[in-house]
Amino acid sequence: HGVPVNCLTAYDLYVCAAEIGSPEGMCCAGILLEEGKVDALRLGSDRRKDRERALRKVRAKIRSAEGSEEGEGAEGDGNDEEEEEEPPTLDSLLGVGADPRHCLYTKLEGKMRDALDPITKSKRLYEAQKWYEAAAALDHSDAIYRLARMTEKGEGELRMDKKKAAALYYKAAELGHAEAQADVGHLYEIGCGEDFRQSYKGAYSWYLKSASQKSSRGINNLA
């Protein structure tokens, strides 16, 4: 859409959304942390005031733009040029451009960054877990699914617990999450404890639900 990719700016905006109660914002903030798109060291600083200031400025800019739409032609070309000289960017509003590590971290991906600083990985997975838990409490299916994956692997501060992970997959599947439905189908296919006794009929049913949402895993498992 013509907007340059900036994961740090995106993270701050997701957190702004999360702080006003958006489960989608909570989950997206967690995803950026889990996937290593933002680093936990940067998140240690207090950026709440920066976010609030940014939101106020963005809202004021939107109100100003809406109010001046009709009078834009009468303003004259000179005024339009002045406004375009120094347009406030989200980076400048959020202070992202001032972060000297930004350029470095946009080049370093996942495993490379984790190898350089395993403490950072532990910190950001913990932060991701907290965002997922907050969104899961609001029945956000993707947050529940991602929390299930972390529980299955024992990531963040979660103890590895396959039984609990299976229950979370099932909850996400019931909420309509296509990937979780494929996972529940797999649980029934192989059999997993008392709650998911082996049942090819059950597996087929969940794979079908997943495939109906065009999940490649659901479709492949049906084949």
Image (cartoon, rainbow, N blue to C red):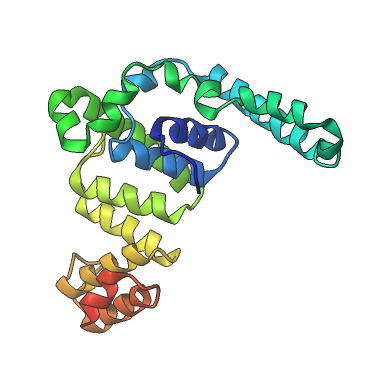
* Quarter of the image that includes the C terminus: bottom left
Decide: is 80 above or below 35: above
| Apparent side of residue 81 relative to residue 171 in the rendered image (left or right) | right
Where residue 168 appears, as percent x and y from the top left, is: 34, 55
In the displayed structure image, the side of residue 27 where residue 103 appears, left or right: left
Q: Is residue 171 visible?
A: yes
> Which residue sits at x=37%, y=66%?
178
Above or below residue 45? Residue 103 is: below
Q: Which quadrant of the view contains residue 97? A: top left
Specify the farthest residue to the front: 77
- Measured from the top left, where is residue 148 in percent x and y? 30, 51
Residue 205 quadrant = bottom left
Tell me which residue sits at (38%, 22%) in the image.
43
In this rendering, the answer to whether 168 lies above or below 102 is: below
Percent x, y for residue 19? Answer: 55, 32
* Residue 136 in the image, given as x and y percentages of width and height: 44, 47
Can residue 133 be seen?
no
Q: Is residue 152 left or right of residue 168?
A: left
Which residue shows up at 19% across the image and 29% down it? 113
